[in-house]
Image (spheres, rainbow, N blue to C red):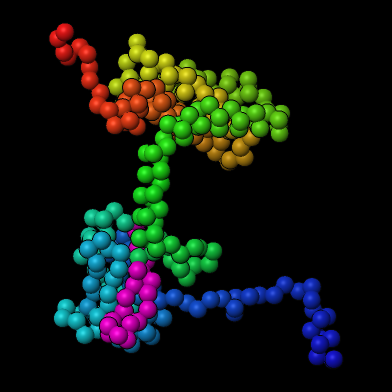
Amino acid sequence: MQGRKSQNQFWWFWCDKTGYQEKVKQVVTISNKGDFSINNELRKAIKTSKFEVRIKKDCSQILLLPDGKEITDVGNRNRMKNYAALEKLMSRKIKLPAYYVGNWSDENGCWIGELVLSNPNRTGKKVIKWTDYLKRKEYNRRYFEENRIELCTKLLYTYSRDSIKRIMNSSSVDIAEMCKMYDYKIYFEDNFLGVCRYYYVKRNSYQYQECYDACMAAYLYSMYHCAISTKKDKEGYIMAYTRKLMKIYAIAALTISNESRNICKYNGFRRISADSYEV
């Protein structure tokens, strides 16, 4: 009872749980300067500083072979230069530094690691495999291609209006003062014209008016959003955020406005211009 009582009398103290962390994972790191390094846990598992490095063609996996032919040495510091590995990763446009996590395989007699997006030994970071990331990216691309008309319509006519109403109900925003400080014609009209030039939208076309309405909606939403923002560099943030939003809204407007292309795409038709045929 005495020991139990002595423990309970310190219940209001904060407990340091650093000693209860998960086991350190074995990691290979390749930096953007060509530094190839292994951590101490991997060194203990492989039991040598000399091994052959092999990388899969898609860079999703790496092998460390102690009994390989082309032996390299990381030395006592567990680090060396490997520009060949760096070149392969850059050719695949993989974000650097690259991290490989794995374990020693007794069956194959080598260390096998898989590419992940972040260092797993850093607290608060979720480990995501590169292959899972590519699958998710491909799924998002296909989902957008199949539902892009609906998604763009929601962005232009539902999301921005609902967000503005929510901001107006939750806080008293002086939007007129914001519009005077960041006038559309002075700061953002050139950006709108640049978007039209980039996507070959002519001034007398139907798409031009659609883009103009979408960019004005983006400008208005940005003013409401930035009015309640607590960013330190507020002026720079407003300029960058509004210009980026105008481009996104313009792309959404162009996606919706070309109705003939959308009808043909979703019904398997081919677009034919009547002017190219003689009647």
Q: Residue at x 19, y 81 (%)?
A: 68
Is 248 contained in the magenta span? no
Q: Is residue 106 above or below residue 14?
A: below
Q: Is residue 61 above or below residue 107?
A: above
Count the marks: how many?
Answer: 0
Is residue 252 shown to the viewer in this render?
yes
Is residue 83 shown to the viewer in this render?
no
| Residue 192 as seen in the image, left or right of residue 79 | right
| Residue 44 as seen in the image, left or right of residue 156 | left
Q: Which residues are magenta?
A: 95-114
Which residue appears farthest toward the bottom when viewing the image? 2
Q: Residue at x 49, y 67 (%)?
A: 122
Q: Is residue 204 above or below residue 187?
A: above
Q: Nearer the viewer, residue 129 or 268?
A: 268
Dominant SS type (magenta)? strand
Q: Nearer the viewer, residue 177 or 102?
A: 102
The image shows residue 239 at horizontal and vertical percentages of 49, 31
Dividing the picture into quadrants, the one containing residue 84 is bottom left
Q: Residue at x 24, y 74 (%)?
A: 53
The image shows residue 159 at horizontal and vertical percentages of 55, 32
Dividing the picture into quadrants, the one containing residue 170 is top right
Q: Is residue 130 above or below residue 200?
A: below
